[in-house]
Amino acid sequence: MKDQQLLKRITLNPKVMVGKPVINGTRLTVEYILNLLAHGATVDEILEEYGGLTQEDVQACLLPICLIRIPT
């Protein structure tokens, strides 16, 4: 799936979760999903816990990190 398609899965709305980026149609923030992954949760575990999510939703949460340019 292309970057732009993945990014369409993330919404910014000041009225939802204080404007934090969330997965469309949920109140799950990108930050929350990244925190789960950072603490060892697998994508399958996240999908099992939050039945409405897809693998692409989780990928969309990871994409902004991939776009960060770290100086070398």
Image (cartoon, rainbow, N blue to C red):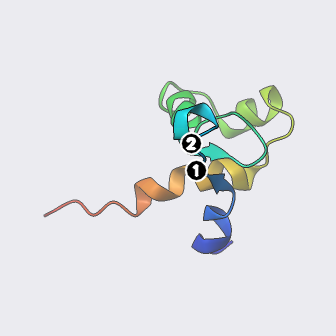
- Residue at 56% in and 45% down: 21
Return the x and y of residue 68 as percentages of the image width and height.
33, 60
Disc 1 versus disc 2: distance between alpha carbons? 7 Å
Query: Outermost residue, left direction?
Result: 72
Secondary structure of residue under mark 2: loop
Of badges 1 and 2, the one in the foreground is 2
The residue labelled by disc 2 is 14
Where residue 10 sits, quadrant-wise, is bottom right
User: Residue 68 vs residue 42: left or right?
Assistant: left
Amino acid carrying label 2: it is Pro
Secondary structure of residue under mark 1: loop
Choose between 23 and 39: the one closer to the eye: 23
Return the x and y of residue 60 as percentages of the image width and height.
61, 55
The residue labelled by disc 1 is 12
- Residue at 59% in and 36% down: 29
Q: With respect to residue 63, does 47 lie above or below?
A: above
